[in-house]
Structures are given as structure tokens and as C-alpha cells.
Image (tube, helix red, strand yellow):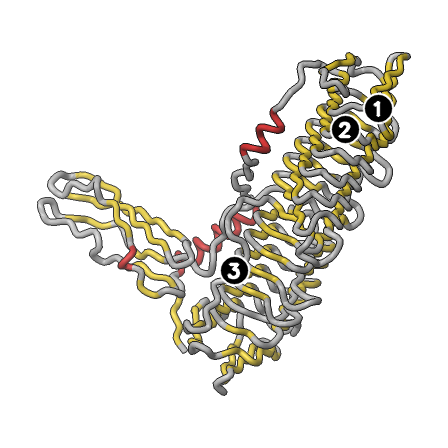
Amino acid sequence: MKSKKLKGFLLLALMANTALSLANPTFAQATELSSEISQILNDQVRLESGVSYIDAAGQVKEITIPSSAAVTLSASSSTVSIRANGQTHNLKNVQEITFKKINVSKLVCFSANTVKKITLDGVNFQGGVKFSGLKSLQSLIVKNSTFGGCGYSIAVYSAPVLNTLLIDNSTLKDDLRIYSNKSLTEATVSNSVLKSDAKQFSNKKGYRTNFVNTRFDPTKCLRDISSGGRSADDIFFMNPDNTAIGASRFNAATPGKILYTGADNVVNTVDIPAYTAITTVKDVKDSVTIRLSNGQTHVLNGVKELYFRNVDIQTPLAFQQKYLRLEKLQIVNSRTRSIKVACSQTLKAFEIHGSELSHSSANVSLSSNKALESFIVQDSTFTGGSCAGSISVAHSPSLKQFIMNNDYMSGYLSTCNIGSVVLQLSNSQYDDRISSANEINGVAGPQIVGYLPVIEASDRVHSKGEQFDPIEGVKAYDFEDGDLMSVLVIDDSLVNADRNGVYPVTYTVTDSDNNMTTLTIQVTVN
């Protein structure tokens, strides 16, 4: 067992940076829409407000309706009926139709069989809209619009040839429902606000909904973003960016580590040989006992931080002893079973990076951890058999950040009574559902994995005229990779060793987790 003490000033700096990030959560750059989708959304009709359509003969026609007018709208079989300003328009066998900046107070039921393309632009449908049984509909575009409703704001179902469904820059005050569209492989909901549930099921096998830069407002009751079950045949993505998800870095052929600290802030290391599994993890009072498949046993006393790295954990992790003073739990580049932490008075941070919960019954359950402030899951996959692969976080009102980046979940994500924290979910796939009353909004940038690398260098005085060596007295390392001097980047281009002055020298080092540390010192030449 090896140990190394964190330098006092470094520990204080890390603690300060952590506190600052929790108090001021940052949002990464928004996910961009594809050029194809952007082009579709940018298409406009010349009409200021009213209805523009292509009739059965292929002629473009318009009906001007003031945006202040009350409109009644319905469509069945071969006729679209529009009533406004005391006039009724019955449009027969319409091929394409655009409704722009009109107000409809009642539920709109749209079932015209001949229409191939529908666009809603800047409309206010106070009673919501239902698109059903449209046998010819291929494209449905909704943008810059607002929808009320009673039960749903937008329902799209039983449109057998529908292949394009886009909703952009719109507000839905009730449910979004997309189901039983047998040709539909993908829908995109972007730059919008959803105030209730989003439900999808029974579309074409492999169907996905992409929620891009879309905010789900907080609700009084649990909200469901659901796909009709755990099947990968019907899924949804939160803020996809076309980079890899669930990229587990566990490698059984490479030795692993358990790192932990106690009250003295010493980082202790337990080396785990390759192909050696962890078979028992048990908390007793303020200690954790760990047994390995090779027969070794390690007792970790007074644990404050516990960090598993590149290990195969073949036993459930359960920390529920009230005497255990655990403040941070990290699972990095590992494979594990279920994880449960409950009723902790001290746990502040929980993190999973580059890992797979792929053993049977692999779930994460965090409950009644009153001090929990940070929940981060990144580059990980949750499968765990037919009834697992889920995350539940409940009764933890002190949470300040909740982040999921680049993850794959075959099961559900559920939160309950976790304060007012905003869920930041980016580039992650969900096969089942998300249940939460909290706001879901924005994406977080890449998160620090494990320990930041350390650079030890101090301001120095250099004698004029002598050769300057920027590496003299400098160390670069971290607790996972060890010595990092071979990858230390030094910028001493401004130093003039032949002239009196104060010159900056900047050191930068990146570890195997892509964590970066930069340090600038001042060199005084005299």
C-alpha cells in the first residue's frame, strides 16, 4: 500500500475550485442542428399571416388572416375547413399547407388524407393539435409556435408514410405524443420548452427522438420523457452531438487501483493486479473492508474519499453505515454491479466516469443523502441485464449540480425531492424513460476525471548571463499516472537570460484522462 500527501496549498486550491464550480455551474456551447434540418426550418412563405397552400392542381394559393383574428380549424378526409372573420374556406385535396401566425382557441383535429406536408409557423393553438390518420403526410414542421391543450399539446400518430418531424423554437404546455408512425425513424425537438410529458412508442423499429437545446420546465408532479419501454427499438437522445457514448475504458488486462484518503488528506493507493476482481466491499462503522479474488483483504480506515479505478467489482457496492464519514465516491474506468448509498450525512460528491454497469442487477440508487451536492456520470454505459441499467436519485435536497455526459442507459433515470438543481444531460441515449420534476436544461462541458495533475514549480531568481534551465526544480505528476515530466509542455519564450527583468514561464501538463493543469511562475533575472 502506497501513500502520498496532498500539498496544503494544492488541496486548498482544489477545494476552492470545486466550491466555485458548484456555486456557479457552467453551460457548454449549445448542440448544433444539422445543415439539412437548419435549411428545412429556414424555409419561409411570403404570407405575413394566414394560410398558404398548394391545391390539387399544384397551384400556390393564399388566404390572408389577421393574426388577431379568432380561427376555427379542422381537417377530415379530403377537406381542410378554416373559419375566420365570418368566412369559411373549405379546401379540397390540398397537397401542402402552411398555417402562419394564426390563433386557434379549440383543439385542432387534423386528418386530411391528401396532405403531404404541413407547416405550423408562429401559430398559437390554445387547445392543442392532433394529427392522426394522415395517409399521405410525409413532412410535419412546427416552428416558433405555442400550444396549450388538455391532455396533450401535440399528438402525431398513425401517419404511415411520415418521415420528417421537426419541432423548433416552440412551447408546449401539455404533452408531446409521437406514436404508431410506421415509417418514422427520427424526430427532432429543438430550442423549445416542454412543460409536461413527452411520450413516444410503436414507431418504426429503431426510431429516435432528438431533444436538442430544449428545456423541460420544472413541474409540481413527476414528468415522464418515455419511449414505451426498455427496448432499443424506440429511444431518445438528449442533446446529441454525434460523438461516442458509453465509452467504457475498463480493461481487465491492465492493473487497477483503489485510491482513498482519510482525515489527514493522505492519498493512499491499493494496487489491484490484472485479471483480479473485487469480490467483497463491506462498510463497518467508519471503515471499508475490500476482498479480492486472489484472497487478499484490505481494510481502509476512516475513509473520506474512495476511488475505484480500472477494477472489476463483482459485488454490489452498498454504503449505509451512519458512522461511515465518506465524502466522495468515484468509479472510474471500471466494471461494476449495483451501487447504493443511503442515509449518509457526509457524502458530498458521487461520480462515475468511463465505466460500465453491465453485471446483472447493475443499478445506481442514491437516497436520503442530505449533504450530497454533486452527481456526475460521464462516458459510461448502464445495461445490467433485463431489469437493470437504471439510476435513481432521491431525497437529496442539497444537490447543486447534476450532470450526465456521453452516457448510454438501457433503463430509467429517476429523480425525486432533489431540490431545485437543473439536470444537465448531454449526448446521452435513453432506451426507457426519464422521470423528474426538476428542470432539464443545457449541457455541461467535459468534467474532471479523478485527480488533476500536479505541477510543482515556484518563482525563482536567475543570474544574468547564465543559461536558463526551465525544468530545474520542477515536478509534474498525478496520483493515477505517476510521473508526467515526459509530457510537460513548457513555454519560456519570453525569458531573456541576458537582460534584467521579470519574465513569465508557463507549464502545462495533461494526464491520461485529459485533465489539464497549467501553472505560470515568474523568473527574475538580475
Give neighbour class at mark 1: few <14, some 14-19, many 20+ (Cα, 10 Å): many
Q: Which residue is mark 3?
A: 353
Residue 421 seen from this side? no
Q: Is residue 331 above or below residue 201?
A: below
Amino acid bearing label 2: Val
Q: Quadrant of residue 174?
A: top right
- Residues 214 and 330: in front is 214
Is tag 2's residue or tag 3's residue first in the polypeptide sequence? 2
Give neighbour class at mark 3: few <14, some 14-19, many 20+ (Cα, 10 Å): many
Q: Quadrant of residue 386?
A: bottom right
Q: Secondary structure at mark 2?
A: loop
Asked if the residues shown at circle 2 and circle 3 are in contact, with their CB atoms under 8 angstroms apart, the answer is no
Disc 1 and disc 3: Cα gap in Å? Answer: 54 Å
Q: Which residue is mark 1?
A: 80
Residue 115's disc number: 2
What residue do we see at 59% from left, 68% from top?
358
